[in-house]
Image (cartoon, rainbow, N blue to C red):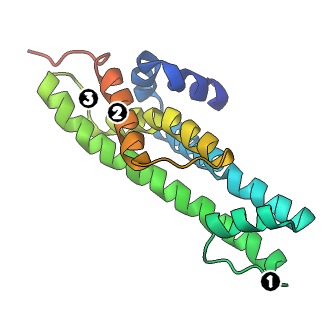
């Protein structure tokens, strides 16, 4: 199944998230890198507007998203480098979230007496990140901020993972 179909299915279907546990780890890693690219699009768009127009709102957005970057005459050199490191940082954060939720998923699987290894739960957690990543990206594009955003993010991922764990087969008796 192509990555865009997997993304669409993982937004709304815990049953498909549970089914994706059987695919190869390479496909899951490719999916996480594509997801981090989608999440970094607001920063790419803001940097492109800044480079094209140089207007103040784009400058403010770039400085908010990439605070270590000072915009001066060398911005044409530093912005692509900063965006690359921003993408790498987002990728690392998604892999870290998937790893943490896979560990939490192991506890849930053992409590519910379901069958699942860490490798299966890592793949399921990677796809459970999709809805949270989409909402985060849309909030960044709209410049929305709200309190407890991280808590909502983690609860949404945990909820999707828990709903998908229900579709795992039961443990042998």
Question: Circle 3 sits in a helix, a strand or a loop, which is it?
Answer: loop
In this rendering, the answer to whether 61 lies above or below 123 is below
x, y percent for residue 135: 55, 37
Instruction: Identify the residue position indicated by label 1 in the image.
Output: 72
> Is residue 34 visible to us here?
no
Give the SS element for disc 2. Answer: helix
C-beta proximity under 8 Å, tags 2 and 3: yes
The mark that comes first in sequence, 1 or 2, is 1
Foreground residue, 101 or 151?
151
Percent of width and height locating residue 47: 78, 62
Q: Is residue 56 visible?
A: yes
Q: Residue 14's x, y, as percent?
A: 42, 20
- The residue at 28%/39% (across/down) is 118
In the image, residue 71 lies at what x, y percent? 76, 79
As measured in the structure, the alpha-carbon distance from the residue carrying label 2 to the one carrying label 3 is 6 Å
Residue at position x 77%, y 68% in the image: 59
The residue depicted at 28 percent of the width and 18 percent of the height is 166
Distance Cα–Cα, label 3 vs label 1: 52 Å
Examine the image and state in which quarter residue 170 appears: top left
Q: Is residue 21 left or right of residue 43?
A: left
Disc 1 to disc 2, C-alpha distance: 47 Å
**Disc assigned to residue 120:** 2
| Secondary structure type for disc 1 | loop
Of labels 3 and 1, earlier in sequence is: 1
Residue bearing the label numbered 3: 116
Where is the N terminus found, in terms of image quarters?
top right
Please state if 100 lies on the left or on the right of 32 as rendered: left
Work out whether 111 lies above or below 25.
Answer: above
């Amino acid at each position: 199944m192509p990555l865009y179909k997997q993304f669409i299915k993982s937004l709304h279907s815990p049953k498909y998230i549970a089914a994706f546990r059987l695919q190869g780890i390479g496909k899951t890693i490719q999916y996480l890198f594509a997801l981090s690219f989608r999440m970094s699009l607001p920063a790419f768009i803001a940097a492109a507007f800044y480079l094209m127009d140089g207007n103040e709102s784009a400058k403010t957005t770039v400085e908010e998203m990439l605070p270590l970057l000072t915009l001066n005459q060398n911005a044409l050199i530093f912005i692509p480098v900063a965006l690359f490191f921003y993408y790498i940082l987002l990728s690392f954060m998604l892999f870290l979230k998937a790893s943490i939720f896979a560990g939490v998923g192991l506890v849930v699987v053992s409590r519910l007496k379901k069958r699942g290894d860490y490798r299966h739960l890592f793949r399921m957690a990677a796809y459970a990140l999709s809805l949270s990543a989409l909402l985060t990206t849309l909030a960044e594009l709209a410049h929305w901020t709200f309190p407890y955003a991280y808590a909502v993010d983690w609860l949404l991922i945990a909820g999707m993972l828990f709903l998908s764990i229900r579709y795992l087969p039961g443990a042998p008796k």
